[in-house]
Image: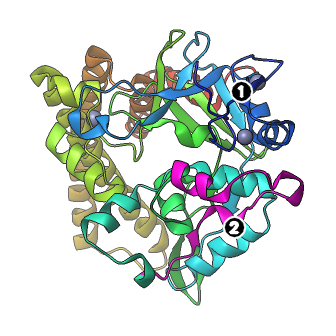
Amino acid sequence: MSNQCDYCFKNCSNKLKLCSKCLKCGYCSKECQKFAWQSHKFLCSSSVEILNVKTNDSRNSSNSMKGLFARKSFQVGDIILKEKPLMAVPYADMEHIDQQIETSFNQLSQASKKAVYDLCDTTLSIRTKNNIDSTTITQTQITPNLFQIEDNNNDVDQDIIDDNINPNIKTLRGILKSNSIPQGNASSVVIEGKHELVLPTACLYSLSCRANHSCNNNAIFTWRNDLQKELLIAMRNIQKGDEITVSYDGVCGERDYRRQRLQDNFNFDCNCILCVNNDQKIEEGLELIANLKYQINFTQSGMDTKAANDDNDNDNDIDKSREECEDEDELAKKMRTDLCISMGEKALATAIEINMNTPMHLQHLHETLALLYYKTGMEEQAIKQYQQFTLFKDICYGNSV
Ligand SMILES: [Zn+2]
Ligand SMILES: [Zn+2]
Ligand SMILES: [Zn+2]
């Protein structure tokens, strides 16, 4: 067993004081144990733990990547974690984002500041790669002196904290970019007559943020406004000891596209089981689902716009030629709907066959099909699909809160 304190990371010559509850964490002093408890209390009795990820990838072996692991088994729909945000940064444009982040950070307790600092900053590697001198970075840099522990703990050697946590300098924006989980979905508001997209508040969590990405994820995040908590929900059955993974941007589509998108947006090469195995059948299935979902959404949005326009033009007298036109539109609309239905049915069959992120895909596909069946007067089928949709919707919302 290592002699390193789990709070200050100092190597301790005396025996470490173990957490009396879990007997897993050791501290060099009563003070360290006291400060550590602010964040350790969430983990101590939690059904998850943070462990090093075993990786076969030589590029990752130098830094010990951490991940979230199950301490017990979970069934589809089970809530793995319920967590209050550690830090919440309301949406701001690029000009004001750093200021916004700093304001949010400054409101935190010392313990929360430390917990934020402990999260990774994946932008460090880009900055190092591009040889950007750290003094040229205008983002708020975060070093342990921002959350220096109180006077009664001045036996802790600050240099040792610096050396052991990270020799580089993390920035608050880097930590936020690497870890933040959006609180719900983006929404659209009208500002001075123009539609503007409002991104949700970005939140940091001590545990949830440790969940790594997998293209074959076994869990999803759901923000519950009623609880003011982020829920991590099992999307597959998870065994004790399994790593719990989420999808960072709901990536769908074939391997190269997925990996490029993850590299561009999150700065890592995905080495999940799907990306490593590169199974042709599954990859073709994923490509098919992505294409069909895109086509269905595209055609459907076209149909909805057309329907909305039709509703608005009933003030004019309809002349003969217009009527003919409408007949044509009716036919085209019907053909598009039929095409969508057959595409949707095919996508549904494929999603079931390859068992890919099943509940997420199925939820969307059942919903789309229900709508399409309803529009074509196939009420019985529509109801059946809708029942399936609500079933999956409930699963994604979390069982037994
Ligand atoms: Zn210590
Ligand atoms: Zn404990
Ligand atoms: Zn992957």
Tag 2: residue type?
Leu
In the image, is residue 114 above or below residue 99? above
Q: Residue 253's x, y, as percent?
A: 22, 40
| Residue occupying image coordinates x 46% and y 55% | 178
- Please, what secondary structure does the residue beneath circle 1 have? strand
Res. 129 image quadrant: bottom left
Which residue is most to the bottom? Answer: 192
Quadrant for ligand 2 reads top right
At x 72%, y 75%, the residue is 103
Residue ID at (39%, 61%): 123
- C-alpha separation, residue under disc 1 versus residue under disc 2: 24 Å
Classify residue 306 as left or right of residue 220: left
Which is more N-terminal, label 2 or label 1?
1
Residue 99 pos. (x, y %): 63, 80
Q: Is residue 89 visible?
A: no
Q: Is residue 163 visible?
A: yes
In the drawing, does residue 146 fall left or right of residue 277? right
- Residue placed furthest toward the front: 13
Q: Residue at x 67, y 33 (%)?
A: 12
Structural crowding at the residue carrying mark 2, measured as other residues with C-alpha within 10 Å and reported as few (<14), some (14–19) or many (≥20):
some
For the residue pair 9 and 146, the one nearer the viewer reads as 9
Specify the label residue 273 is tagged with.
Answer: none
Range shown magenta: 137-164
Kind of residue indicated by mark 1: Gly
**Which residue position holds label 1?**
26
Percent x, y for residue 221? 57, 38
Mark 1 or mark 2: which is in front? Answer: 1
Is 132 above or below relative to 357?
below
The quadrant of the rendering that contains the C terminus is: top right
In the rendered structure, does residue 221 fall within the stretch colored magenta? no
Instruction: State the residue position of label 2.
Output: 146
